[in-house]
C-alpha cells in the first residue's frame, strides 16, 4: 500500500487523534515491520503496522454487512436516539473518510444494511443508474388487492409531492397482508409511500436483500466484514 505518515495512519483508521499519536508511539504501542516506531512523521505502508500487537483492521477500507435491528436510525445525529453507529465498532465512527451506510432504512425497518468508508461503493450502490435491487418483506394493515401487482409494475405510480413516477417495481403477494416488494430505486420512505398511495399502511418492513447481499445467518444487531477488494 502507498506509504503514509504514521500519525495520519493512526488517526485516519480511527485509533486516536493525530495529536495523541505521539503518546501512542512513546508508549511503544505501534510497531512497523516488527520494530517499535518512534517518529509520527515516518511514512510507512499501513499493512506493515501493528497497533497494540494487531495489524490494522481493514487497511484497504471498511465494508460490512449489518443486520439492522428496529429502534435505531441511520443518521449520525446525536438527538435522534440510538444510531446504527452505536452498534458498530466505535473506531469506525472515527475513521476518515467516515464510515457511512449505503442508503438508509427507517428507524422501524429491519434487515440488510451495507456500511462502508468507500465513497465510490456508496455512489455505485445508491445511484438509480446502477439499478441495485432491494427486496423488502412487507406486512400491511389491509388485505392486499391483486391489482397492486400490475400497478406497481407499470412504472406510472406517482408518490405524493413528487414529479416523476416510480420506476417499475415487482410485487409478489404472499398472504392476505404479506408481500415481497423489489425496488431498483431508493426514494425517501419509498415502500411505505407506495402502499400508502393505495390506502394501505405498512406495519412491518424488513429488507431481506440488497443487490447480491442477504443476511446470511446474521442475527439482528450483528455485522460481518466483507472482502472490500472484491468490489473495487
Ligand atoms: N422504504 C421505506 O418506506 N422505508 C425503508 O426503510 C426502506 C424502504
Image (cartoon, rainbow, N blue to C red):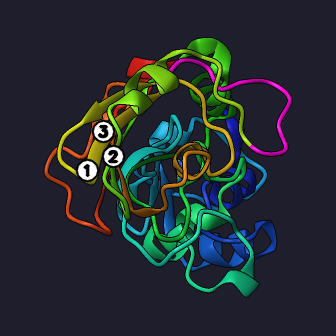
The answer to if 67 sits in the magenta stretch is no
Give the quadrant of residue 122. top right
Identify the residue at horizontal 51%, vertical 18% (top origin). 232
Specify few, some or many for label 2: CA neighbours under 10 Å numbering under 14, 14-19, or 20 or more: many
Q: Height in image: 2 above or below 187?
A: above
Mark 2 beta carbon near ligand 1 (under 8 Å):
no
> Does 112 sit left or right of 97 as displayed?
left
Please report the bounds of the magenta region as a residue range: 160-168
* Disc nearer the start of the sequence (2/1): 2
Q: Is residue 134 visible?
A: no
Where is 55 relative to 94, above or below? above
Q: Secondary structure at mark 3?
A: strand
* Number of numbered discs on residues: 3
Q: Are marks 2 and 1 in contact (CB under 8 Å)?
A: yes
Measuring from the top left, give residue 136's x and y in whole percent.
37, 43
Q: What residue is at 65 percent from the left and 57 percent from the top?
A: 95
Q: Give the labeled residue for mark 3.
A: 180
Measured in 3D between alpha carbons, the distance from the residue under mark 3 to the one under mark 2, in whole angstroms, is 12 Å
Q: Residue at x 65, y 26 (%)?
A: 166
Expressed as whole percent of the image width and height from the top left, the position of residue 114 reads 46, 44
Determine which of the numbered discs, if any, sits on residue 178 in the image.
1
Dot 2: what SS? loop
User: Image check: 9 left or right of 33?
Assistant: right
Amino acid at each position: 500500500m502507498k506509504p503514509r505518515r504514521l500519525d495520519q495512519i493512526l488517526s485516519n483508521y480511527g485509533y486516536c487523534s493525530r495529536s495523541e499519536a505521539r503518546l501512542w508511539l512513546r508508549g511503544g504501542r505501534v510497531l512497523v515491520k516488527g520494530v517499535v516506531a518512534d517518529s509520527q512523521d515516518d511514512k510507512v505502508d499501513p499493512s506493515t503496522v501493528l497497533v497494540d500487537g494487531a495489524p490494522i483492521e481493514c487497511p484497504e477500507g471498511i465494508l460490512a454487512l449489518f443486520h439492522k435491528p428496529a429502534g435505531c436510525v441511520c443518521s449520525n445525529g446525536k438527538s435522534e436516539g440510538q444510531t446504527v453507529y452505536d452498534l458498530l465498532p466505535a473506531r469506525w465512527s472515527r475513521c476518515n473518510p467516515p464510515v457511512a451506510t449505503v442508503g438508509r432504512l427507517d428507524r422501524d425497518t429491519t434487515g440488510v444494511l451495507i456500511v462502508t468508508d468507500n465513497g465510490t461503493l456508496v455512489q455505485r450502490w445508491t445511484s438509480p443508474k446502477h439499478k441495485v435491487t432491494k427486496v423488502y418483506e412487507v406486512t400491511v394493515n389491509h388485505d392486499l388487492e391483486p391489482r397492486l401487482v400490475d400497478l406497481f409494475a407499470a412504472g406510472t405510480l406517482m408518490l405524493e409531492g413528487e414529479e416523476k413516477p416510480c420506476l417499475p417495481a415487482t410485487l409478489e403477494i404472499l398472504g392476505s397482508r404479506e408481500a415481497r416488494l423489489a425496488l431498483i430505486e431508493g426514494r425517501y420512505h419509498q415502500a411505505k409511500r407506495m402502499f400508502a398511495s393505495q390506502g394501505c399502511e405498512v406495519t412491518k418492513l424488513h429488507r431481506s436483500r440488497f443487490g447480491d447481499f442477504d443476511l446470511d445467518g446474521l442475527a439482528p444487531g450483528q455485522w460481518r466484514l466483507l472482502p472490500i477488494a472484491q468490489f473495487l
